[in-house]
Image (cartoon, grey):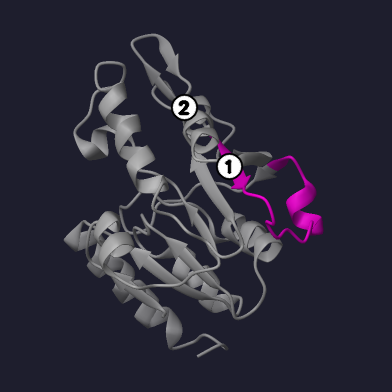
Amino acid sequence: MNEIFHEDCLDTLTKRDIKYDYVLFSPPDYDELGYVPIQDDKKYYDWQEKVYSKLKPKNKVVTIVVSNRRFQRKTIPKHQFVTDIMKNLGYDLLAEKVWKKSPLINLYRYNYAFVLSYGKKGYKSKNTRLFKYDTWCHPHKSYMGYSYNFPGEMIYRCIDNYTDEGDVVYDPFIGIGTTAVCCVENGRNYYGSEIDKEVCKLGKKRLTNYKKISKFI
């Protein structure tokens, strides 16, 4: 455990025998996969369903961070499509939180995202104090030019609520490794997958540098 794999998450999920307690991630947006909103909706959401169907967390909870999309003067309700996918896979929506990224105006994307937690029968949740709030205000900050990340404080709210120390968290789109850093910082273990070579290298370098000062290493 405690490893980031430079590969497609579908390869990780089908070719590696990894065990994990909880899943937390934000899926790639349309443009990261070469898709166009509306035109490629079926391809985009079929691909997501294929990935999500392979997830097997022991504690039966998956948290997905989703930002809706502005496109051609319309709103693409990505959170609605994701919820439909998870429902088809037998998951119930356990919690819906709003992550406020910024108070500013953004003409292309909304400055908030949904933090959606889904569970199956027998799921584990501690109902922690910080998780109970419905709106989470954590400013979004890029890391060395990489902007598809989210704050460690937001990840902490989730792993604190759905895991115990020593549990394993899997992030299939781990990017620059923020989930891994938060796990190390809070006594959890991790697995991650990242298909982009340069992003994966950046994440591993960031994590290596962080480990040098972490009280858990």
Region of the chain picked out in magenta, as a range: 112-135
> Which quarter of the figure is the N terminus placed in?
bottom left
Q: Position of residue 51 (x, y in %)?
A: 35, 47
Q: Disc 2 residue type?
A: Phe
Question: What residue is drawn where x is 65% and y is 78%?
Answer: 165
Eye-nearest disc, 1 or 2: 1
The stretch drawn in magenta includes residue 126:
yes
Asked if the residue at tag 2 contacts the one at tag 1, i.e. Cβ–Cβ closer than 8 Å, the answer is no
Q: Residue furthest top?
A: 73
Above or below: residue 121 compared with residue 100: below
Depth check: give the residue in front, 107 or 180: 180
Depth check: give the residue in front, 135 or 125: 125
Q: Residue 36, located in which quarter of the rendered image?
A: top left
Query: What is the spatial separation of the Cα atoms under label 1 and label 2, in whole angstroms?
Result: 14 Å
- Residue 91 numbered tag: 1
- Residue 81 numbered tag: 2
